[in-house]
């Protein structure tokens, strides 16, 4: 008798609790959506910097694609890159570029403890004792990929330039990039280069950067794509310096 009557007593209470729970979840979801919608560009970028700066480990692979547009021709240069990092002081960045008549060129910056190592096909004598200067030497030739993420991972060690040179960032409409909801933020860098970045709305990791630049007789469109992993497993082989062996003449063809 008692077992038959207990469910009846509590069915009303269960229904009330279910309604309250549904209402709470719905309100929380709505509040979170509103909070994201209300975030300013500066707050989003500050949050992104915090995520990278507080990470235990980080790795990525990506590519910089630069489209050169001349009045009579158009061509694309690709510069793939990888980053591996374990806090506090294990770091490796590499970018590659294939060049006609030269073959593939590589630039590696490696840190373990206080020991900075570098490799560049173009200048094998290139050497700096600080990570700051080593990254600076790779920033331009890598299409910017050498500075952007490393400067957020190690802001105390890499100080010569900000990771992203936005001064008056503006938030654009959100976008979906490969199935990932992203914030979009833009600015005009150095007063002449319109630049837009895509930031994952869940992880606050940088996913894409696009900029365009006008020159006297041509223009460029530069797009950097990132496949980032935050606080994942970074194997020892990903952090090995690993410069290539000396190239023989037939490897250039």
Image (spheres, helix red, strand yellow):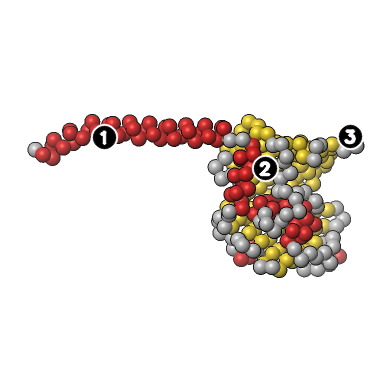
Q: Earlier in the sequence, mark 3 or mark 1?
A: 1
> What x and y, as percent, mark residue 10?
21, 35
Camera-nearest label, 3 or 2: 2
Q: Which residue is mark 3?
A: 71
- Vertical order, 188 against 100 (above or below): above
Residue at the image position 62 percent from the left and 44 percent from the top? 46
- Identify the residue at image location x=76%, y=66%: 129
Q: Earlier in the sequence, mark 3 or mark 2?
A: 3
Is 80 situated above or below 118?
Answer: above
- Compute the Cα span from label 3 to label 2: 27 Å
- Residue 132 location in percent, x, y? 74, 58
Separation of disc 3 and disc 1 at Cα? Answer: 72 Å
Q: Which residue is mark 2?
A: 208
Q: Earlier in the sequence, mark 2 or mark 1?
A: 1
Badge count: 3
Which of labels 3 and 1 is toward the front?
1
Disc 2 residue crowd, few under 14, some 14–19, many 20+, Cα 10 Å? many
* Residue neighbourhood size for the residue with mark 1, other residues' Cα within 10 Å, grouped as few (<14), some (14–19), many (≥20): few
SS under mark 3: loop
Residue 207 location, quadrant: top right
Q: Do the CB atoms of the residues marked 3 and 1 lie less than 8 Å apart?
A: no
Residue at the image position 76 percent from the left and 42 percent from the top: 222
What residue sits 61% from the left and 51% below the top? 52
Image location of residue 84, percent across then percent down: 64, 58
State the image coordinates of residue 180 (x, y, percent, origin top left): 58, 40
SS category of the residue bearing label 2: strand
Disc 1 marks which residue? 14
Left or right: 74, with 187 as reference point: right
Q: Is residue 146 visible?
A: no
Residue 16 in sight here: yes
Judge by depth and name the residue closer to the eye, 181 or 237. 181
């Amino acid at each position: 008798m008692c077992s038959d009557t207990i469910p009846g007593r509590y069915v009303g209470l269960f229904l009330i609790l279910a309604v309250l729970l549904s209402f709470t979840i719905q309100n929380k979801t709505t509040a979170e959506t509103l909070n994201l919608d209300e975030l300013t560009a500066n707050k989003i970028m500050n949050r992104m910097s915090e995520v990278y700066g507080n990470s235990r480990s980080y790795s990525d692979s990506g590519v910089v694609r630069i489209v050169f547009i001349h009045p009579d021709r158009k061509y694309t240069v690709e510069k793939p890159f990888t980053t591996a990092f374990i806090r506090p002081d294990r770091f490796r960045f590499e970018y590659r570029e294939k060049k006609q008549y030269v073959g593939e060129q590589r630039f590696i910056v490696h840190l373990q403890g206080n020991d900075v190592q570098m490799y560049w096909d173009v200048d094998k004598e290139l050497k700096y004792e600080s990570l700051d200067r080593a990254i600076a030497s790779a920033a331009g030739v890598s299409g910017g990929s050498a500075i952007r993420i490393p400067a957020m991972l190690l802001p105390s060690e890499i100080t010569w330039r900000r990771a992203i040179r936005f001064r008056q960032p503006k938030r654009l409409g959100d976008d979906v990039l490969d199935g990932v909801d992203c914030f979009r933020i833009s600015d005009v860098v150095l007063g002449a280069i319109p630049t837009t970045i895509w930031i994952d709305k869940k992880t606050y990791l940088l996913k894409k950067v696009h900029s365009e630049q006008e020159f006297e007789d041509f223009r460029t469109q530069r797009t950097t794509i990132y496949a980032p992993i935050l606080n994942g497993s970074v194997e020892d082989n990903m952090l090995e310096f690993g410069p290539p062996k000396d190239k023989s003449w037939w490897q250039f063809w």
